[in-house]
Amino acid sequence: MTWPRIFVSAVLLLVNLCLFPSFGEGQARRGNDPATMTDEELTREVELEKLRAINRALRKTEAAETRVIGSIQKIDCRNGILFTVKTDNETFALASKNFDSLILNAFVPTTGTSLVGCEADVSSIRAVITYNESSVPNGTVRGDLISIEFVPPGFRILSKEEMTKSFAIDPSTQITDSKEQEAIIRSIRQALYQPKHGETRMLGYLDRIECSNSERYYVIRMVAKTYRLAGGAPETMPIRLFTRELEGMQFGCRMQPIDVPVVFIYRDTPDSKSGSDGEIVSLEFVPRGFTLDEVVIKMRI
């Protein structure tokens, strides 16, 4: 089965309690000052900032849509496709014509080649579920399912006031202080995935994702070479953001080239039959100007 419209959103990672914009001119501003907080306040604020990051990246709802938090208790394909949804207050059913029309985002680690399918068991994973209520009342089916976004336990939709109190760096501001830039770069380097034996880590730009019935290839451009790397299903692909520039980005087969640098790890296992240069392990998008080493690596956009 193919999944042309199922995407994965990156799990937004907070580094030094911030989400970082591109480096350049301007001033960084925070709504709260971590330096004046107690340990308890700082721990609580870090957890709240993680919730804010996911809230920002959730699919934006339209006027006629309804969004709830709960879990998918059952997927039944015997007579059409029915999803049994359970929230804290009720249980109801939603319908879908096919899986291809669904939008799937994952903000928690997931396993398996196909996270959502007939008889799949995802009942233990909390999810933000969006649907359109049916114009014709039905005793068993409430409406049409639009998207499923898997989130961590305890996740909640934050109020506008809670969102505006964020001390993450505002995306319209930039950092000029060289020491702060160096500290941010150093923190990101320490937080990046480390390549294991037989793996290589490099810095480039994601040009596109090629999709066929059974394969997916990530095409990554560098100065000297363009890599075509075989990848796994979108639900299981480790993708992280260390920049707010790509907030809400959905990675799929029809995406445009991304001019934000990406640190990628791959296994050097070329396959002449498929034209692959190896197997992709992870993607981590970093701020413009970021380098893996102390030496500046100039990339062509």
Image (cartoon, rainbow, N blue to C red):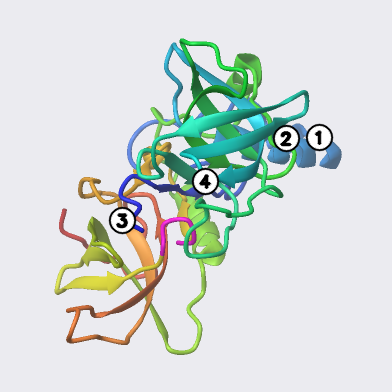
Three-letter code, disc 4: Arg
x, y percent for residue 86: 70, 33
Residue range in magenta is 233-237
First in sequence: mark 1 vs mark 3 = 1
| Residue found 35% across the figure and 52% down from its top | 3
Three-letter code, disc 3: Pro
Using the numbered discs, state the Cα–Cα distance from disc 2 to disc 3 in whole angstroms: 29 Å
Q: Nearer the viewer, mark 1 or mark 4?
A: 4
* Circle 2 SS class: helix
Residue 41, label in figure: 1
Mark 3 = which residue?
A: 261
Using the numbered discs, state the Cα–Cα distance from disc 1 to disc 3 in whole angstroms: 34 Å
Using the numbered discs, state the Cα–Cα distance from disc 1 to disc 4 in whole angstroms: 51 Å
Using the numbered discs, state the Cα–Cα distance from disc 4 to disc 2 in whole angstroms: 46 Å
Mark 4 = which residue?
A: 78
Using the numbered discs, state the Cα–Cα distance from disc 4 to disc 3 in whole angstroms: 45 Å
First in sequence: mark 4 vs mark 2 = 2
x, y percent for residue 75: 58, 45
* Circle 3 SS class: loop
First in sequence: mark 4 vs mark 3 = 4
Most prominent secondary structure in the magenta stretch?
Answer: loop
Q: Nearer the viewer, mark 4 or mark 2?
A: 4
Using the numbered discs, state the Cα–Cα distance from disc 1 to disc 2 in whole angstroms: 6 Å
Mark 2 = which residue?
A: 45
First in sequence: mark 1 vs mark 4 = 1
| Residue found 31% across the figure and 87% down from its top | 269
**Residue 234 in magenta stretch:** yes
